[in-house]
Amino acid sequence: MTGAGVLVVGASQAGVQLAVSLREHGHDGPITLVGAEPRPPYQRPPLSKAYLGGAADPASLELRDQAFYANKRIDLLPAERVTHIRQFPSGCGTALTDQGRALEFDRVALTVGARARRLTVPGSDLTGVCYLRDLADAALLRHHLTPARHVVVVGGGFIGLEVAAVARSEGRNVTVVEAAPRLMTRAVAPVVSEFYRRAHARRGAEVLLGAQVTRIEGEHGRVTGVRLADGTRLPADLVVAGVGVVPRTELAEQLGLLCDGGIVVDEFARTSDPSIVAAGDCTVLPNPLTGEGRVRLESMPNAIAQARVAAATLAGKPQPYADVPWFWSDQYDLKLQIAGVADGYDQVVVRGDPDGEAFSALYYRGGALLAVNAVNRTADYLVIRKALAKGTPLPADLAARADVPLKDLLVATPAP
């Protein structure tokens, strides 16, 4: 590489990890990390949990202090958004920011993340309609949540349900409106969806499934209610929209990279232009456990693991993504831990007691173990995550023996 060094676009968890991992691989040239947000890089998972609940502040969320970046010789540029990138056939090029700065690079990495999908119904621009993707969103949401009495959460995914749990725990009247016939449809089996519907209802939240928001009503510019397709009106002085995210692919498209629901990368985090890598929520990648299809893994663990892979590729020491994907969600006193990817499952084995709020759902396809959802069953989660990492089989008929600990059921012989 020449003297311009590596430009990491996106001061996210993935961006920080990529820059740090480059140093660990011995890269001695310049590294520039540029991000649009005014604050230094920070953790996002606590935004819908500890931060929203008042147990964390912005300073406690910072990934590293300023001295760390200086020590690692990482030039951190906050409050600047890269708007254009020009790359030459050699791989080097220039990026332009919205502040008029030109950043030269020898290699470029995209860790640009995703943005919250916006509601498009009438009234969605009223004051009191909030989203939760970054720290500014979280601060605004916290501001509106403090005086709120009636909270309507649009979207029954992880973010929506975590916000609902915080709001209900603080005594607000909470209604969750989900257009699909069940909660968290993309991530969990019906048995887990139904468990969470009942769990939220037991704690006093109302959950409406198969319900479509047609407009948001307001007075004097502020939200006052939500109208559903069946004519129902829900009182609301705060509406929180958790209707998914949209990967930021604009720069990738400028560069002519293949995008399909995200920036398409291979197991080495290489884009369709092998001189460019990408990592984090902006990407779609082959299933790390099967190599099949493409998956988008919206999680902090994936951002870290994929960034390490991308750094190794840039350092000329390519190593494939081999980590078991994992994720967690805290709702009330319920900890959901997920390991693996359940796409294409054809069988679910339930261990434990959903009514007792401690159980696991094991996912299989063609008899092969794919994933686990563990609710307040950390031991099950850890065993399955280890089994997936080692390729150790666990036949469904054995897993169904709820009286025997999972660790005693694992077959010692690796799966073929």
Image (cartoon, helix red, strand yellow):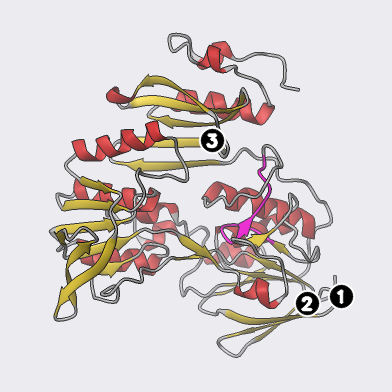
At 73% across and 74% down in the image, what residue appears? Answer: 256
Q: Residues within 10 Å of mark 2 (few under 14, many from 20)?
A: some
Depicted 166 relative to depicted 400: above or below? below
In-front residue for pair 327/80: 327
In the displayed orientation, state which residue is furthest to the front.
Answer: 230
| Residues shaded magenta | 278-288
Name the main secondary structure of what is drawn in magenta.
Answer: loop
In-front residue for pair 158/181: 181
Figure quadrant of the C terminus: top right
Q: Which residue is mark 1?
A: 90
* Cβ–Cβ under 8 Å for marks 3 and 1: no
Query: Which numbered marker is on residue 404?
Result: none
Figure quadrant of the N terminus: bottom right
Q: Position of residue 22 (x, y in %)?
A: 73, 58
Instruction: Give yes or no for residue 21 being in the magenta stretch.
Output: no
Mark 1 against mark 2, which lies toward the viewer? 1
Q: What's the CA distance linking mark 2 and mark 3?
A: 40 Å
Q: What's the CA distance linking mark 3 and mark 1?
A: 40 Å
Q: Which residue is mark 3?
A: 339
Q: Amino acid at mark 2?
A: Ala
Q: Which residue is mark 2?
A: 4
Q: Residues within 10 Å of mark 1 (few under 14, many from 20)?
A: few
Q: Position of residue 43 (x, y in %)?
A: 47, 56
